[in-house]
Image (tube, rainbow, N blue to C red):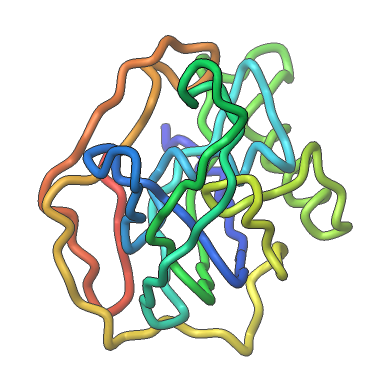
Amino acid sequence: MIEKIYQISFEIAGPAAMFARPDTGSSPVSYPAPTKSALKSIFECVAMSKEAYFEPQKVEICSPIVFHKYSTNYGGPLRKSGTTNFQLFATVLENVCYKVYGVTMAYQAPYNGNNQQHKLQEIFLRRLESGQFYSTPFLGWKEFVPTYFGPLRNNTSVDSSINLIIPSMLSTMYDRPTKGIVSPTFVQNVEINKGVIFYAK
């Protein structure tokens, strides 16, 4: 029996994005492309489920990779005790555009007419088309909201001039796709070939 595949695709673009490399510390630097965990977070801004989840498979990078300096006043829990806030300096991406492809997965096979993969796919695509979101979508950092987030557009295409290797890249932050505990995993020598990046499981 051939297992049915429940495909997902969407496009997201914005003036800035930050997919922070964990090894860059207090002055974070973005990866040149989104991580699997970041794409999963974008998907979950539209639809979430305890029984199914989004598995990113491929991204087409549709704009040149350009880094620029960014600074902001940080007032979060990692600041020094007794201080109100401090300036955080980062290196982020600017003018990004991605076409994202993946599938919905479930923890168990369909039963009694209950197909969680199909249900999550249908809810996501319907909400994406109508512009209904569970929470505000963002590109890595929550202040980086997109200017476009919706179905694939015909007037954008992959930038085939982009070819590079990412020596080590964060893959997932948790030991399971939903309700997991923190357990980061990394993949090595991730290739961007002609503007396309494939995410290994």
Quadrant (top left, top right, bottom left, bottom right) of the N terminus: top left
Place of residue 61 in the rendered image (x, y in percent of width and height, measured from the top left): 41, 72
Quadrant (top left, top right, bottom left, bottom right) of the C terminus: top left
Q: Quadrant of the rendered structure where residue 36 is?
A: top left
Residue 125, compared with residue 110, is above or below; it is below
- Number of numbered labels in the structure image: 0
Query: Residue at left 39%, top 15%?
Result: 182
Place of residue 177 in the rendered image (x, y in percent of width and height, measured from the top left): 47, 23
Residue 36, compared with residue 8, is above or below; it is above
Place of residue 4 in the rendered image (x, y in percent of width and height, measured from the top left): 51, 40
Place of residue 98 in the rendered image (x, y in percent of width and height, measured from the top left): 51, 68
Query: Residue at left 61%, top 61%?
Result: 10
Q: Nearer the viewer, residue 162 or 67?
A: 67
Q: Nearer the viewer, residue 15 or 129?
A: 15
Residue 124, compared with residue 77, is above or below; it is below
Query: Residue at left 38%, top 77%?
Result: 66
Q: Quadrant of the rendered structure where residue 129 is?
A: bottom right
The residue at the far front in this view is: 82
Query: Is 145 displayed left or right of 163 in the figure?
Result: right
Residue 88, compared with residue 9, is above or below; it is above
Query: Residue at left 49%, top 26%?
Result: 79
